[in-house]
Amino acid sequence: MTATQDGTDHVLQSSQPWLHQHGGGEIQKFGTVKQFPVGLSYDARMYAGQTLNRTLADTQILYALYKKSHWNVRGATFYQLHLLLDKHADAQLALIDAIAERVQSLGAVAVGDPRHTAELSTIPRPPDGVEQVPAMLSRLLDAHERILINAHKAAAKSAELGDDGTNDLLVSQVIRTGELQCWFLAEHLVDTPLVRI
């Protein structure tokens, strides 16, 4: 800042970025909620922040599993599954954003770092290599079921706490998307011949 002739301060402007800033540390700790005027109790917002972050972590891992499967699918149904898995991944990516924004709108902090996500997730890590298609699809179905079981419990508890927004997100987006995707995946595991001999 520089002083002008009339004694007021004047901020010098520059196009130079202020690089390598580290600030004074975190301004909000993970696992806390700040007060927001959204008409919900602290307990309701704290519960939603915690449960949605677990759902968010699992959904981020499920998204990654879909992309891994999309890239590595093999066999006679390659084309159909390659497209389906990518479509499902896109839907999970949209859910990730919706869940994270709900967490933030309640005054909590959304989990974002992949390493932190892996720590919070309940979904088992897949092998690093390529699995056969039935194992790959079964792994996706297992991940979906874990998310759905938790989402059903969280939706009921959110409704009990008067948190209609979280309940709606869980029911209309997380649960309905997951159930639809499970149906599509499970039908690929039905052992039916393409032609009769």
Image (spheres, rainbow, N blue to C red):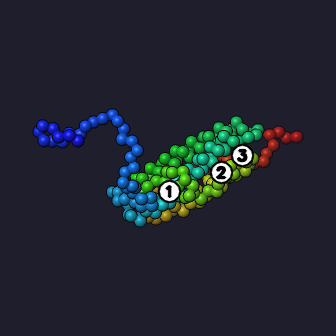
Q: Residue at x 35, y 57 (%)?
A: 36
Q: Where is residue 4 drawn, in percent x and y?
A: 15, 38
- Give the residue at the far left of this rendering: 6
Q: Nearer the viewer, mark 3 or mark 2?
A: 3
Q: Report the amino acid beneath label 1.
A: Asn
Query: In whole angstroms, how far apart are the C-alphas of marks 3 and 2?
Result: 14 Å
At x 25% / y 37%, what residue is drawn? 12
Residue type at mark 2?
A: Leu
The residue singled out by tag 3 in the image is 130
Q: Secondary structure at mark 2?
A: helix
Mark 3 is surrounded, within 10 Å at the Cα level, by few (under 14), some (14 to 19) or many (20 or more) other residues, namely some
Residue identifier under label 2: 140
The N terminus - image quarter: top left
In the image, farthest residue toward the top: 15
Mark 3–mark 1 Cα distance, whole angstroms, equals 29 Å
Q: Is 111 placed left or right of 183 in the picture?
A: left
Q: Which mark is residue 53?
A: 1
Left or right: 148, with 193 as reference point: left
- Left or right: 72 with respect to 88? right
Tell me which amino acid carries mark 3: Val
Which numbered disc, 1 or 2, marks the residue that appears first in the sequence? Answer: 1
